[in-house]
Amino acid sequence: MDCKTSEEKINSKYMDASLIEAESFRIISEILNEEGVLLPSENEAVIKRCIHTTADFDYAKTLMFSENAVSVLMDLIRKGADVVTDTNMALTGINKKELFQYGGEIHCFMADEEVAKEAKERHLTRAYVSMERAMRIAKPVIYVVGNAPTALISLMEQYDQSGYTPAFIIGVPVGFVNVVAAKELVINSDLNYIVNRGRKGGSNVAAAIMNAVLYRLREPDQ
């Protein structure tokens, strides 16, 4: 989606973080309206937060949602599901205060020495092995993947071969090798997911999706 912009001047009114965010979302909504883009109400908050995080309106077209994805994810969070990320950046970016109030914990095994050792011995990526490690968690797990397509490949191979079922996959790895194909594996499955089709994504986008859903849970009607 192409957005025409004119030279912007500093507006001293917008020096407060909350005002900046509110104005940003107003501008996003205005541009989407001008382009004639109508977002599904359930997915709107997620899509707009991804656009807010990246300033990239392509997310209005490329974010894919399984049936009732946002409702399913909110229900998992309410019931205390754990979260596993493929990067410490995504872990840092997720609002843990919001998550913890529902009883969920958040993990990233990428820096685990045993994971690194096993990955080297098996000639696999740490992301692949860290997902196997996460599968030992004895409760539903929401996987938040923003960097490594091999994390998605690991999850999908275990799903196909052993029957392990991720409770939810946020799959938005960024890059050029195995990225598109790994995302399509998830999209073509019967799992619960939010996936960005194509090469774009990143840990910041993965965290933004999770935060968008956490913030929706604040709303009185949820």
Image (cartoon, rainbow, N blue to C red):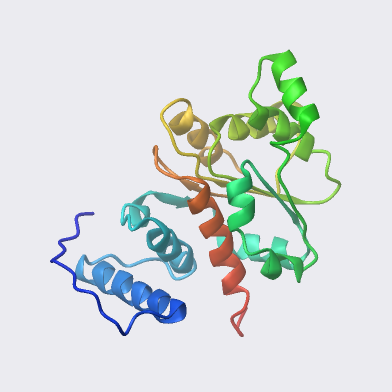
For residue 216, above or below residue 153 = below
Q: Residue furthest right?
A: 138
Q: Residue at x 58, y 72 (%)?
A: 215
Q: Quadrant of the N terminus?
A: bottom left
For residue 155, above or below residue 121 = below
For residue 218, side relative to residue 13 (left or right): right
Q: Is residue 157 visible?
A: no
Q: Residue at x 59, y 35 (%)?
A: 152
Q: How many marks?
A: 0
For residue 222, above or below residue 185 = below
- Front in this rendered view, residue 217 or 114: 114
- Front in this rendered view, residue 31 or 165: 31
Q: Position of residue 41 (x, y in %)?
A: 44, 71
Q: Choose top left, top right, bottom left or bottom right for residue 102.
A: bottom right
Q: Position of residue 194 (x, y in %)?
A: 53, 51
Q: Quadrant of the C terminus?
A: bottom right
Q: Is residue 84 visible?
A: yes
Q: Position of residue 4 (x, y in %)?
A: 15, 61
For residue 113, side relative to residue 23 (left or right): right
Q: Residue at x 32, y 73 (%)?
A: 29
Q: Position of residue 90 (x, y in %)?
A: 59, 50
For residue 83, side relative to residue 220 (left or right): right
Q: Choose top left, top right, bottom left or bottom right for residue 171.
A: top right
Q: Choose top left, top right, bottom left or bottom right for residue 71.
A: bottom right
- Front in this rendered view, residue 194 or 29: 29
